[in-house]
Image (cartoon, rainbow, N blue to C red):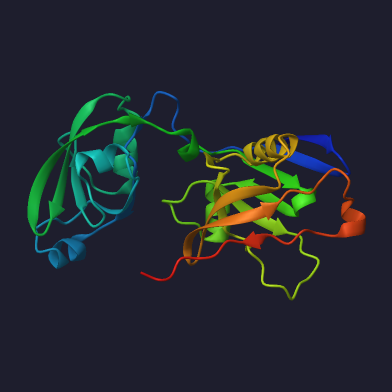
Amino acid sequence: MFARRAMGICAGFSWILVVVMGVSALAFGAQDGYLGLSVQGANAAVGEALGSGAREGVLIRGVDLGGPADRAGLKPGDLITALAHKRVKDYARIMTLMRAVPPGKRLVVTVVRMGENHDLSLVVGQRPPARGVVRDAVASVPAIGITVAALTKKMRTLFAVRWETTGVVITMLDAEDADATPALVRGEVIRQVNQVDVWRPDQVVTLYRQAKAAGRKNLLLLVDGAAGSRFVLIPIAPHSISRGAAGALTPLKLPMPPPQ
């Protein structure tokens, strides 16, 4: 059952809506360890393809830049066969082992790389807030025609967001001219607002209000989409503009650099 809370904040002629919905989800507690990697199951065929005798383990799909696995030298494509000298059979096994490891503990990760076994020393970290999103939450700022949601597992699956990406996902856009080329696309992820990392929808609301109170004309968003990352300027609606009379404001796209 959902526990729902909604809060409306008056801002000129527009309303900002924040909705938080508590959900049941399996998540690590505050004292559980964090490796900073995404994995996928493997089998004997994978071991054969890698030129090793490994018949089980997990493949590293992605590594959190600057996280514990990255600092330890683990790489995408590595096949993890043991953690703290304990055999890793599959995804469920590595999850079970990690629940018993607190942040700060040093352990050995055994991997197969280029047909050879390597033992790498890793210091377990603590899960960053952006990686610990387990509650559904939505925020809407009608003055700029945007609705965003927290990147829970459900939302990542719904919008096919890569594990490496953190932020808030755009779930709705309001544009008066449907034929105009939008600067934002539903399903893209906002990583930053005015150089501040965001991972909760209410952070977008707060940064919008702060920018408006400071008299700024635009918000600078760092957005991840199908074509990669880019910066987008979003005009801030002045207090004197009514959305009913003026319609949605079209985001301004910054010039893109030439392909490298």
Nearest to the observer: residue 163 or residue 257: 257
- Regarding residue 1, the answer to whether it shows in the image is no
Q: Quadrant of residue 199?
A: top right
Q: As rendered, which of 99 and 148 lies closer to the eye?
A: 148
Task: State the image coordinates of residue 8 (x, y, percent, origin top left).
Answer: 82, 36
Which residue is pictured at 70% across the width and 42% down the height?
A: 216
Q: Is residue 248 above or below residue 140?
A: below
Rendered location of residue 166, percent (x, y)? 49, 47
Image coordinates for residue 94, horizontal then vertical, percent: 29, 41
The one nearer the camera, 51 or 182, is 182
Which residue is outermost to the right?
A: 245
Instruction: Examine the image and state in which quarter residue 119 appears.
Output: top left
Q: Is residue 192 visible?
A: yes
| Residue 215 image offset from top left, x and y in percent | 73, 39
Left or right, 3 with reference to 14: left
Placement of the N terminus among the 4 image quadrants:
top right
Q: Residue furthest toward the bottom?
A: 179
Residue positioned 90% across, 51% down in the render: 242
The quadrant in which the C terminus is found is: bottom left
How many numbered circles does the render carry? 0
Residue extending furthest left?
Answer: 116
* Residue ID at (76%, 64%): 175
Vertical comparison of 123 with 191: above or below:
above
